[in-house]
Image (cartoon, grey):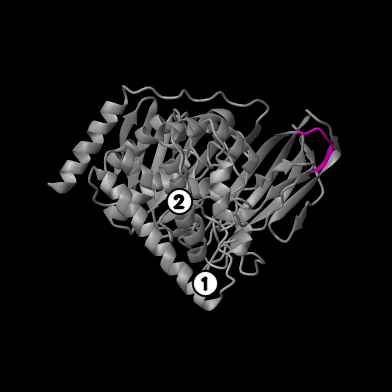
Amino acid sequence: MKKAFVVIFLLFFVVFSMSACTEKAPETIENKNFYKLNLVLNEELSSMSLYEEVTFYNNSEVEINEIVFHLYANAYRKEAIKVAYFDALTRYGGISINSVTLDGVQCETPNIYNEQILKVKCLTPLKPQEKITIGLDCSIDIPRANLRFGEWEDNVNLANFYPILAVFENGAWREDAYTYIGDPFYSETSDYEIAFTLPTEYTLAHSGVEMSKNQEKDVHTYNISCKNMRDVAFVAGKDMRYVTSVYKDTTIKYYYQGEKSVEEIAIATSAMATFSELVGEYPYEVYSLVETPFVFGGMEYPSLVFIADDVDIQEKETVIIHETAHQWFAMLIGSDSINAPWQDESLVSFLTNYYYELNGAHDKFESNNALLTKSFDNFIKLKYAENPDYDKNINSTLYKFNTNYEYSQVVYNKGALMFNKLYEVIGKKRFQKALANYYRSYAYKIASVDDFYASMSKGAGLDVKGIIEPYFANKIVAWNMEV
């Protein structure tokens, strides 16, 4: 009865919220980079071929002499300098670049630095507002791992595996190294056209919209369109099915294997409705959540998220809410998740809990805050016992954290409490206006920390920086403000 009540409540909320007023989806940006991916997965699930064409626009004010890509898949090599895995793998992975063309002209073998950075020299300097198309013929080895990229138990997770353009900013390419702590990914919004061929016994969950599906003998090909996305991801699963619901103009798909109830799709739909009303309208036609073997609870990508298949329904609810909030923060509004991970992860951790307050579960909102406080207090007491000078600064790069546990305590837990304080100080109405203005100003773009402060402050009508930054310096003061 309790589970049935939860589902009925969630579905009621979704229907009720459809009548509410929502900030419209922002308009897209011009001169986006464009990817064409042609992927073929072999039947053993151990390798795949990829032909990729990328049209890059020089939107900077300087000439560019080379095009730089991240090769994240090479973080799964046995000899990798920066690895994506924790222990030895029974099958390692990686990507090989077989040939490169520039505007159809065959190039010399490109330079690969530290295994994970591909640099393609332009034939002539690329001037501002000019574009160039790079063709990459690639062979990919799929590791055996239940990580972002890997095959496990008849499922293949395919994320952060194809060559993706680095970000060109301040006159230089960002060549950030991989780390298995946090999310070491940073990219710009692009458009994608994808043809993905795989054995017919496998279903493909994917970012974007399926335009068509063709079958030939023992394989089928999905033709997929992904508009205004800063990355794409896939999961291929045997005997994988899905259930659907609809919120406004978005179809929500929940992929699973085995027995399922209606709880997960109801939670996902409620989360979509809640954050659409709080922040602004979700612009993508399809939002897919896929249960898959995964070492963490979940992982976000534009219009698709991973949900670990071995968690119970209570933890799954938290993961679904958290990853759905990420659709707005880090996916639609880009930020520097390497040097300022708090900008999306701390905010989303607060919103995961704030979801309950917005849906009338005030006691759960308060008890979750108490649990976060207790967890972080216990962590910091142990750290201070080991080292009285321990620096627990939220505003740290990924590379300053020694473990994922430390990262989660500081950025997730303490960061959520930081945003909870901001919410308490400025109040519900100002907080919602701040988020809506942030979304309206920076959807599809990349927002710096200063951009975040400026847009949030403008929306709230007061300075949010002065409330947040004391948490960075560990100088928390008592706030008293009438709003």
Residue 278 falls in which quadrant of the image?
A: top left
Residue 244 visible in this rendered orientation of the protein: yes
Tell me: 271 left or right of 32: left
* Residue under the image location 24 percent in, 34 percent down: 11
- Image height of 285 relative to 300, above or below: above
Q: CA distance from mark 2 to mark 1?
A: 30 Å
Residue 371 falls in which quadrant of the image?
A: bottom left
Residue 44, position in %: x, y? 47, 57
According to the picture, the residue beneath numbered tag 1 turns out to be: 87
Label placed on residue 416: 2
Which secondary structure lies at badge 1? loop
Which amino acid, mark 2?
Ala
Q: Which residues are magenta?
A: 60-66
Determine the residue located farthest toward the right in the rendered image: 124
Q: Nearer the viewer, residue 285 or 266?
A: 266
Which amino acid, mark 1?
Asp
Which secondary structure lies at badge 2? helix
Residue 377, position in %: x, y? 43, 65
